[in-house]
Image: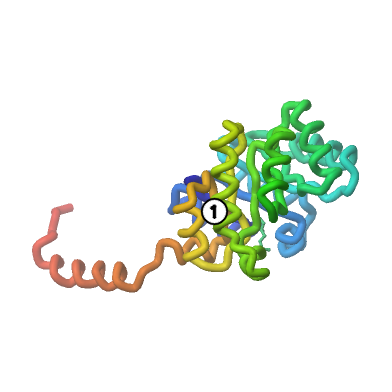
Amino acid sequence: MMYLLDTADTKEIKRLMDLYPIEGVTTNPSIISKARRPVGEIIKEIRHIIGNDKMLHVQTLGERAEEMVDEAVKLKEMVEGNFYIKIPVTPQGIKAISMVKKLGIKVTATAVFTQQQGLIAAKAGADFLAPYVNRLDNMSCHGVEVVSDLVHLIETYNLDAKVLAASFKNVDQVHGISMAGAHAVTVTPKLFEHLVYHPLTKQAVRDFEEDGQRYYDLGA
Ligand code: G3P
């Protein structure tokens, strides 16, 4: 499973990319608005930090398919490298997915809440499907189940799409989608650190330090 960061916080991207096997960054208009800077400025900075090989997912804002396609072309030109345009699975969005794919731009279908939305987006050519796990859980709609069904549909119909699960609030949700076979997950920097943290690991390392100090002089 690939891990991505769902953030436009460039300091955190830099810090966590240095530590962990993170394969890219996802953003959306709400995330960009929190950074309080123009989208072009932020995504160029993110690209500079992560390099050309890592994935960068940036979302459209327009409502009509033609606007989305126009945005996709402009955003791709701005950042180059391994770029995905995120397009919401509205009717116009599904149309835009097919159009953008014909231009050779990779697509992440986003704001996916149902299995059929995901399946149709995959048929339209989406490379990734992004179901919103926590927002589903908040409505008792079982985010992990939707992810699991999407993985199953992709396998059943031999589709090229992958599931990039999004919208998480806790470690258990992330564990749930990893067990369901999601191909990728995007989480906030804070949640990513929760995936790694355990108090007993910290304690074990403290104990090793204390026990080994006298016997670990490896010389200069
Ligand atoms: O990538 C989509 C994600 O940012 C939505 O997350 O926490 O706003 O539900 P959230």
Q: Which amino acid, mark 1?
A: Lys
Residue 20 is situated, as x and y percent measured from the top left of the image, at 44, 52
Q: Is residue 121 left or right of 17 when viewed as pictured?
A: right
Residue linked to disc 1: 14
Q: Indicate the colouring scheme.
A: rainbow
Which one is in front, 94 or 87? 94
Q: What is the quadrant of residue 123 in the picture? A: top right
- Please indicate, yes or no, whether residue 40 appears anywhere in the rendered image: no
| Residue at far left of view | 215
Which one is in front, 24 or 37? 24
Residue 149 is situated, as x and y percent measured from the top left of the image, at 58, 49
Using a 10 Å C-alpha cutoff, classify the residue at mark 1 as few (fewer than 14 neighbours), some (14 to 19) or many (20 or more): few
Is 195 above or below relative to 128?
Answer: below
Q: Is residue 11 left or right of 214 when viewed as pictured?
A: right
Q: Is residue 112 left or right of 61 when viewed as pictured?
A: left
Report the residue at 76% width, 56% height from top.
29
- Please indicate, yes or no, whether residue 76 appears anywhere in the rendered image: yes
| Residue at far front of view | 156
Which one is in front, 88 or 8? 88
Report the residue at 41% width, 62% height from top.
196
Residue 182 is situated, as x and y percent measured from the top left of the image, at 52, 48
Report the residue at 45% width, 53% height from top.
179
Report the residue at 78% width, 27% height from top.
103
